[in-house]
Image (cartoon, rainbow, N blue to C red):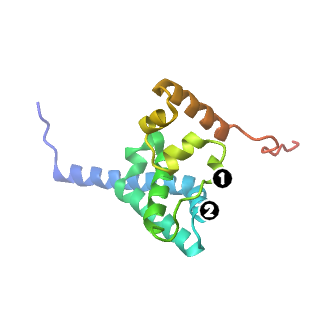
Amino acid sequence: MRLPISSDFLLKNNSIMQAQSLNTFDNMYNTYSRMLYGFAIEISPTQSEAEQIFINTFYKAQQQDIARTHANCLFATLIKLTMQTAREELEGKITKIPTLSIFRNTPLLHMYLCENVTINEICKKLSLTLEQTVILFRKEVHTICKPKPNSLILQKV
């Protein structure tokens, strides 16, 4: 049985969806903008090029609605999008995108996120099974996410 839906209902819900989408984009921007701008600065020869990479990355993120479509892997998707944008923006200006400092000790994550190498290509390159590669990925993610000593400031109450 189909229920009749008025055009007012559709317009109202469309406005709500747009507001939620904007809110999701704002949250994504507020959460990741500093880190991604830092990546763009680290990659780019000049600050103006870094700013262009940063702006274009978030423009693409909004156009592709990745805050909604890639919600489960948003951070990785934003890094890949930043690196893709950097390659496009810096084509002919630099020969190789440098290793981001956050990935200096995590070569698999660097290959996957920054060099656009697929997981299957990494398996072949390292002669590993998919399971072995996933285990190594998890170790590398743990390395990055693990809190560093003295990174927390304890306050006396």
Report if the CB atoms under discs 2 and 1 are less than 8 Å apart: yes
**Other residues around mark 1 within 10 Å, as few (<14) / some (14–19) / many (≥20):** few
Q: Determine which residue is flagged by label 2.
A: 42
Q: Amino acid at mark 1?
A: Ser
Q: Position of residue 11 (x, y in %)?
A: 24, 55
Q: Position of residue 126 (x, y in %)?
A: 52, 34
Question: Where is the C terminus found, in terms of image quarters?
Answer: top right
Q: Secondary structure at mark 2?
A: helix
Q: How many marks?
A: 2
Foreground residue among 120 and 7: 120
Quarter-wise, where is residue 140 in the image? top right
Q: Secondary structure at mark 1?
A: helix
Quarter-wise, where is residue 3 in the image? top left
Q: Is residue 129 above or below residue 140?
A: above
Query: On the picture, is 22 further left or further right than 110?
Result: left
Query: On the picture, is 42 further left or further right than 10?
Result: right
Foreground residue among 128 and 153: 128
Q: Position of residue 59 (x, y in %)?
A: 41, 63
Residue 101, numbered label: 1
Distance from Cα at disc 2 to Cα at disc 1: 8 Å
Question: Where is the N terminus found, in terms of image quarters?
Answer: top left
Considering only order in the chain, which callout, 1 or 2, is on the residue closer to the N terminus? Answer: 2
Q: Is residue 137 above or below residue 57?
A: above
